[in-house]
Amino acid sequence: MASYPDKSHVATDADFKESSSPSRCELEAVATEKLVMRKLDRHILPWIFIMWLLAFIDRSNIGNAKLDGLIKDLHLTGDQFNVTLTVFYILYVLLDIPSNWLLKIVGGGHYLPILAVAWGITGTCMGFVKSYGGLIACRLILGACEGGMFGGIILYLSMFYKRHKLMFRLGVFYCAAPLSGAFGGLLATGLAEIKYHGYNGWPWIFFIEGIITILVGITAFFFLPHTPAQCKFLTPEERNFTIRMLKNDLSGATNSEQVDDEQFNWPAVRMAIFNINTIVMSINFFLILIPIYSFSLFLPSIISGLGYTRVRAQLLTVPPNFLAFLVVLASSYISDKIKKRGPCIVVGLTLGAIGYIIQIASHHNGVKYLGTFFIAAGVFPCSPLVLAWLANNLAPHYIKATGLGFQVAFGNCGAFVATFTYLQKDSPKYITGHAINLGAIGLSLIISVSTMAYVRWENKARQSGKRDYRLHEGDESMLGFRHPDFRYTL
């Protein structure tokens, strides 16, 4: 049974400092932190999880609709289907950074649910589409509505959790992405059988899934808090404790007591974008998203190309996606436990590479299907890992908001590659698509290993005092992640 802290003691900054023999105050601080984490997890993570689950379902259900007659009913020819996939990411990419700034102004507890309601309405409208132009317009608007969700969730969670408590929470929300492939495949199989008032099959995938998103978004609006200081489910003592805990976790990178106290400024924007961690990890995210998006969008087509019927192909998308769901959770837990991101990314990329090599080299359908498990289990965990890696290495909050926005915006440009990796003319083997994804994974491996080497070198320089000169450059509170006491996460 958990040991609850004495509410008469309010933990101070000293409670967070290391000691060879823990005092009563330090033990109380540990107990308070565990209690606060449980409360935050219980009141925040379920809403974040289900909204991201629905976000991924609503963007990728067009792949299920394709198998259920969308291309035939809308008379799509050539690469028009691939174009409809691509336009989603135009506004999705452009809105990432300003969306993170807007989240700070509106408050994440309201902003994220509003986005969910907006894309839920748009997704529902896709079921009424009768032409290629209408489908393009809906996908464009859907991308605009979902554009701030991914980076926004990461930024939002970083307001509540310490840097090395964040990865598991990111894993919990992100594992909804592969789960959406499993759940979406099952749901689409049933919804495609509905025929009512002239809407037969695929429109009902959009109708039902869009309406569910709207209802969830409206409900979440009334339950999600904006910041730790506004968590009504925490006592005043617990709120103060959380604020101090998060400040101490940044090791001198900020003097602000609360994220609400930080003010926007353009030097922080330049500092967020023009540093090696942001640039390199944004490129890495770009490469990682190529196999993730192509897998999510085209897995039904890839499995169908192995000779399975429409219904069986939909159902066979479930097992590899469910495995990815479990691996994302496991890798996130392990990453937080060892307090490292890079090594976990390298392992995942290696598994993904094995999967694509199987796809290219094997001539047996059963073995190729086995390869999809390696791909799913390998690439899906890498996305939250590389995002948490950058989030851990940027501070304070406005710098983190801008850097994450840039990473998500730049990284999602990988979707423009992913949507054209699997073309109809390359079916059923799709060798070109598999080769492109394998190449992206190889480049990502090189970048990940190089980044780990840089982080070790920079942390060693700070440890030896080679960065102490920065303390005399001006206002120490403006150093952020450049502060000599701040250590990068490996």
Image: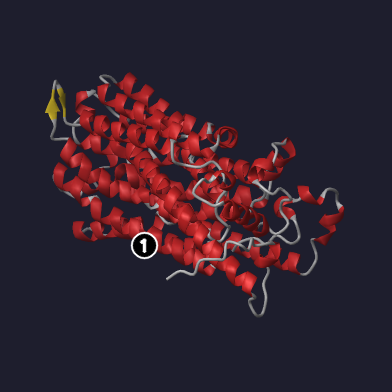
To which quarter of the image does residue 107 belong?
Answer: top right
Depth check: give the residue in front, 148 or 454.
Answer: 148
Q: Is residue 430 visible?
A: no
Residue type, mark 1 in image: Ile
Q: Is residue 309 above or below residue 483?
A: above
- Vertical position of residue 434 compared to residue 370: above or below: above
Residue at horizontal 34%, vertical 47%?
A: 295
Residue 64 vs residue 331, the one in the foreground: 331
Percent position of residue 474, x then y? 85, 48
The percent coordinates of residue 174 (x first, y second) are 42, 50
- x and y percent of residue 271 in the render? 71, 44
Q: Sort mark 1 into few (<14), some (14-19) or many (20+) by Cα contacts within 10 Å.
A: some
**Apparent side of residue 325 relative to residue 239 in the rendered image (left or right):** left
What is the quadrant of the N terminus in the image?
bottom left
* Residue for point 62% across, 47% down: 279
- What is the secondary structure assignment of the residue under circle 1? helix
Picture residue at 50% right of the left edge, 34% below the top: 111
Q: Quadrant of residue 247?
A: bottom right
Give the quadrant of residue 57: top left
Residue linked to disc 1: 354
